[in-house]
């Protein structure tokens, strides 16, 4: 029997270790057999990069086990608030979960208001908004987490209107063919700040496998359309998930930061060209990305990719945009 392959990740030194970074998207969870809690994140933060703050995004962990169904996601915000307090008490250099994004079901319409208010009560200094997965594809070969056309649903939009009333952001998660739907939502609600997650998920699996050029053309048109909405910012990252169609998670030797840089370049540079650096922010999407890349190598790739940008543009990409979108105050 052949021995199991040895996975070598992060065999690089951190580039530009002084560059300030706000990690605009990560999770904390226990999903047996996987665990990624404070100590696990803390280990990755020792990568040599200057991660000064993070944005913790919900993942369906820590929900309350009793009480009204719609209020149960408040348990995750309570968990993330507690994690942020523990990290601060331990004098961890990084301000972990400086901003918290927790789920509320916008399809409740006006009835979502008490849930949003409960989130704000649970985390009065850090809660900034909600994410919502509206992923849907007609093929039936992908994971659908919503009904078709959810972003245009009347109840959903009534719930969405409460984000402006409570000064909260919206983290959008959908597949690349759905980008025009998000553009329509953004135009109807120009006063709500929207963060498009994971560069709008250009797909490489199911019916999109082996069609990378075709997908890029469709995706790039969608990105260009949504970039015309000034209230939308975009997170640069999330490509290491299996849905992207790369084999990184299966490789015994993971890609180097130089290899990642060249693969990511056409996608990320298109986003930066269309949105501008002031509406783009880098994200780790850990621990989802952990199977494909190490924390050190991932941020090295981002730094390589932006080496030719100005100092002001890089400051926005790595730190300032995320801090503005999620209202993370300066220390």
Image (tube, grey):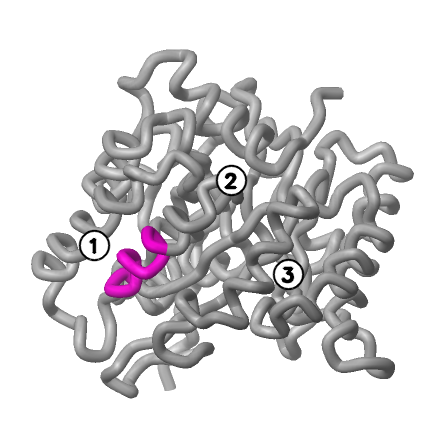
Q: State the extent of the magenta-drawn residues as a range.
A: 176-184
- Kindly identify the residue that appears in the image at 75 percent across and 30 percent down: 93
Sooner in the amino-acid sequence: mark 1 or mark 3: 3
Q: Is residue 39 magenta?
A: no
Residue 187: x and y in percent read 37, 47
Q: Tell me if 284 is positioned left or right of 54 in this view.
A: left
Q: CA distance from mark 1 to mark 3?
A: 26 Å
Tell me the residue that label 1 is attached to. Answer: 219
Q: Is residue 179 magenta?
A: yes
Q: Tell me if 147 is positioned left or right of 114 in this view.
A: left
Residue 99: x and y in percent read 69, 42
Tell me the residue that label 2 is attached to. Answer: 191
Is residue 42 visible in the rendered structure shown here?
no
- Kindly identify the residue that appears in the image at 86 percent across and 81 percent down: 67
- Kindly identify the residue that appears in the image at 23 percent across and 79 percent down: 206
Q: Secondary structure at mark 3?
A: loop
The image quarter containing residue 142 is bottom left
């Amino acid at each position: 029997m052949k021995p199991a392959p040895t996975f070598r990740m992060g065999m690089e030194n951190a580039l530009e270790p002084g560059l300030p970074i706000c990690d605009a998207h990560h999770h904390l969870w226990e999903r047996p057999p996987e665990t990624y809690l404070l100590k696990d994140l803390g280990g990755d933060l020792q990568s040599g990069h200057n991660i000064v703050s993070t944005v913790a995004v919900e993942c369906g962990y820590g929900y309350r086990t009793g009480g009204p169904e719609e209020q149960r996601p408040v348990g995750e915000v309570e968990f993330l608030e507690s994690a942020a307090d523990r990290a601060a008490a331990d004098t961890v250099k990084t301000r972990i979960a400086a901003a918290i994004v927790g789920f509320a079901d916008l399809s409740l319409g006006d009835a979502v208001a008490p849930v949003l208010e409960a989130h704000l009560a649970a985390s009065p200094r850090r809660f900034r908004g909600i994410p919502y997965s509206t992923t849907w594809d007609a093929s039936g070969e992908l994971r659908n987490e919503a009904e078709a056309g959810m972003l245009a649903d009347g109840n959903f939009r009534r719930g969405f209107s409460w984000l402006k009333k409570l000064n909260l952001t919206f983290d959008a998660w959908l597949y690349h063919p759905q980008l025009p739907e998000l553009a329509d939502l953004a135009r109807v609600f120009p006063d709500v700040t929207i963060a498009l997650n994971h560069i709008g998920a250009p797909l490489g699996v199911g019916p999109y496998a082996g069609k990378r050029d075709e997908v890029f053309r469709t995706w790039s048109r969608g990105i260009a359309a949504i970039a015309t909405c000034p209230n939308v910012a975009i997170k640069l990252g999330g490509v290491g998930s299996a849905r992207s169609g790369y084999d990184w998670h299966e490789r015994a030797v993971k890609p180097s930061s130089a290899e990642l840089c060249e693969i990511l370049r056409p996608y990320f540079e298109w986003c930066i060209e269309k949105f501008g650096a002031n509406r783009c922010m880098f994200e780790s999407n850990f621990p989802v990305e952990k199977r494909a890349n190490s924390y050190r190598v991932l941020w090295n790739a981002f730094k390589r990719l932006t080496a030719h940008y100005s100092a002001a543009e890089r400051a926005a990409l790595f730190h300032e945009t995320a801090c503005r979108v999620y209202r993370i105050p300066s220390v």
